[in-house]
């Protein structure tokens, strides 16, 4: 029996990269996975391959969150695990960031997590609890020149996680809330956008001397979502190849 056997799990940003790896790992562990993304074709293909459920969903849209959670409640009767994974970033000095770009990044990376928590927690609580994993970053705990907006959003995710973990503990609703903090990950977007020189520059930042494989991040998410992490809440799990140990 898998560690997530029969559990209803919602994964945002699931069409590619880390989110895809999480969806695959959850399915391998016996979960009933609801995968969401704005990449409709890729999402549908993955859901068909894994024989799981796909929902097109923009995490920055509150009405979309309300409808999504209502549909999960109607279709499955409960929600056991929420993974707030959707997010993006770019390189730009703070003095050159248009306000609309800042707000869109915050809407996805931070507001999307807030909205997921706001709408999913009541359904999870009615079902007796569960686990929430919020995707932060090593840049949710340390700064980096050129990624001020991304750092701000992921730092917000880190502290939001801690506060909501305490709220859930005080409510005694059985919900654990933790954040995960990857280093640089060898995703399709990295392969598509970085030159060999840029990739090498990222590699040497990690004491382990390489980028993470998406499956390594996914396995850590499985751990936090499972009963193996039953005494963890409000925690930051660094999966960064030693990046933040320096």
Image (cartoon, rainbow, N blue to C red):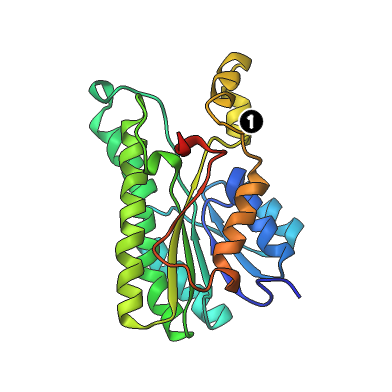
Q: Which quarter of the rendered picture does the C terminus lie within?
A: top left
Q: Residue furthest top?
A: 197
Q: From the viewer's perspective, tell me whether residue 10 is left or right of residue 236.
A: right
Work out whether residue 137 or residue 46 is closer to the camera in this orientation and state it: 137
Secondary element under disc 1, as helix, strand or loop, is: loop
Q: Position of residue 231 (x, y in %)?
A: 49, 72
Work out whether residue 128 or residue 243 is closer to the camera in this orientation and state it: 243
Q: In percent of the image, x 64 and y 55: which residue is there?
A: 219
Q: From the viewer's perspective, tell me whether residue 101 is left or right of residue 83.
A: left
In the image, residue 207 sits, relative to residue 237, either above or below, namely above
Q: In percent of the image, x 38 and y 78: which residue is there?
A: 122
Q: From the viewer's perspective, tell me whether residue 180 is left or right of residue 40.
A: left
Q: Residue furthest front?
A: 246
Q: Position of residue 243 (x, y in %)?
A: 50, 35
Q: Which residue is mark 1?
A: 210
In the image, residue 76 sits, relative to residue 226, either above or below, namely below
Q: Position of residue 34 (x, y in %)?
A: 59, 65
Q: From the viewer's perspective, tell me whether residue 22 is left or right of residue 114.
A: right
Q: Which quarter of the rendered picture does the N terminus lie within?
A: bottom right
- Residue 59 can be seen in this image: yes
Q: In percent of the image, x 47 and y 80: which residue is there?
A: 129
In the image, residue 173 sits, relative to residue 145, either above or below, namely below
């Amino acid at each position: 029996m898998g560690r997530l056997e029969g559990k209803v799990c919602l994964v945002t940003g699931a069409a590619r990269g880390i989110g895809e790896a999480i969806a695959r790992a959850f399915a391998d562990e016996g979960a009933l996975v609801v995968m969401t993304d704005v990449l409709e074709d890729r999402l549908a293909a993955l859901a068909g391959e894994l024989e799981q459920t796909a929902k097109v969903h923009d995490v920055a849209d509150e009405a979309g969150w309300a409808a999504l959670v209502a549909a999960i409640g109607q279709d499955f009767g409960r929600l056991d695990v929420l993974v707030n994974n959707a997010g993006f970033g770019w390189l730009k000095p703070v003095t050159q960031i248009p306000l609309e770009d800042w707000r869109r990044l915050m809407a996805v990376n931070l507001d999307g997590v807030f909205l997921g928590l706001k709408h999913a927690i009541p359904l999870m609580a009615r079902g007796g609890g569960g686990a929430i994993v919020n995707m932060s970053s090593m840049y949710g705990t340390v700064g980096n020149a050129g990624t001020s907006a991304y750092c701000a959003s992921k730092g917000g995710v880190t502290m939001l996680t801690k506060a909501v973990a305490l709220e859930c503990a005080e409510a005694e609703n059985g919900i654990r809330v933790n954040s995960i903090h990857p280093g640089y990950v060898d995703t399709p977007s990295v392969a598509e956008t970085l030159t060999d020189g840029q990739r090498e520059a990222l590699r040497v930042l990690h004491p382990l001397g390489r980028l993470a494989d998406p499956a390594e991040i996914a396995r850590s998410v499985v751990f936090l979502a499972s009963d193996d992490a039953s005494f963890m809440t409000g925690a930051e799990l660094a999966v960064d190849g030693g990046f933040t140990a320096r």
